[in-house]
Amino acid sequence: MRDKVRIHATAEVAESAQIGEGTSIWHQCQIRPDAQIGRNCIFGKGVYVDFGVKIGDNVKVQNYVSIYHGVEIEDGVFIGPHVCFTNDNLPRAINPDGTLKSADDWVLGRILIRRGAALGANSTILPKVVIGEWAMVGSGSVVSKDVPAYGLVYGNPARLHGFVCPCGQRLEAAGQDAETVHAHCSKCGAQIEIPLQTWRQAK
């Protein structure tokens, strides 16, 4: 498969990393062992992908993104420059007795980014977070809680401020019933169902 992958001469890609056909890995990237990367992805300059990370097809990762162990990214996700995925809610360099922490001295906090989501530049995703399909995270946000499908969040901490269409336009309520808001996109005309309880959480 490597003959159908574009890997820049300055990139470091572990032999055991799985890279899908059509993927481009650019200047000074590091892809660690057992990472799984799908087809037709683009990794900009200086991207770091930790061991065991799973990334789907058609994912765009811009410059200097850090994707640490425990992260799974589904198909079609956009990750803006300098986004950082964390994996430890209680980070320390040493134990209380002063000894250096080992690989067994902490609890991994996993992150899941669902299909089509977009993460703005310089956003930070904290451990144990799921970001829903087609959700959008504003630049500079710190995401500490789950984001619903189509949710628009921003701020520190990030809060839900509305909902967006897969085309990126804000959704507007066009009607509702007892359990669902029938949302409409004025740009592309899409009709999307959002649970009423979730819709009401937006600030």
Image (cartoon, rainbow, N blue to C red):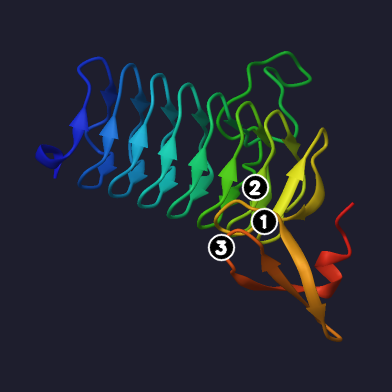
Within-10-Å neighbours for mark 3: few <14, some 14–19, many 20+? few
Q: Residue at x 66, y 59 (%)?
A: 150
Q: Position of residue 170 (x, y in %)?
A: 70, 54
The residue labelled by disc 3 is 188
The residue labelled by disc 1 is 164
Up-down relation of residue 37 to residue 44 (above or below): below
Q: CA distance from mark 3 to mark 2?
A: 17 Å
Within-10-Å neighbours for mark 2: few <14, some 14–19, many 20+? many
The residue lying toward the viewer, choosing from 120 and 10, is: 120
Q: Do tag 2 and tag 1 residues touch (Cβ < 8 Å)?
A: yes
Q: Residue at x 63, y 33 (%)?
A: 86
Label 3 residue SS: loop
The residue lying toward the viewer, choosing from 36 and 188, is: 188
- 2 vs 1, front mark: 1
The first of marks 1 and 3 along the sequence is: 1
The first of marks 3 and 2 along the sequence is: 2
- Type of residue at label 1? Val
The residue labelled by disc 2 is 136
Q: CA distance from mark 1 to mark 3?
A: 12 Å
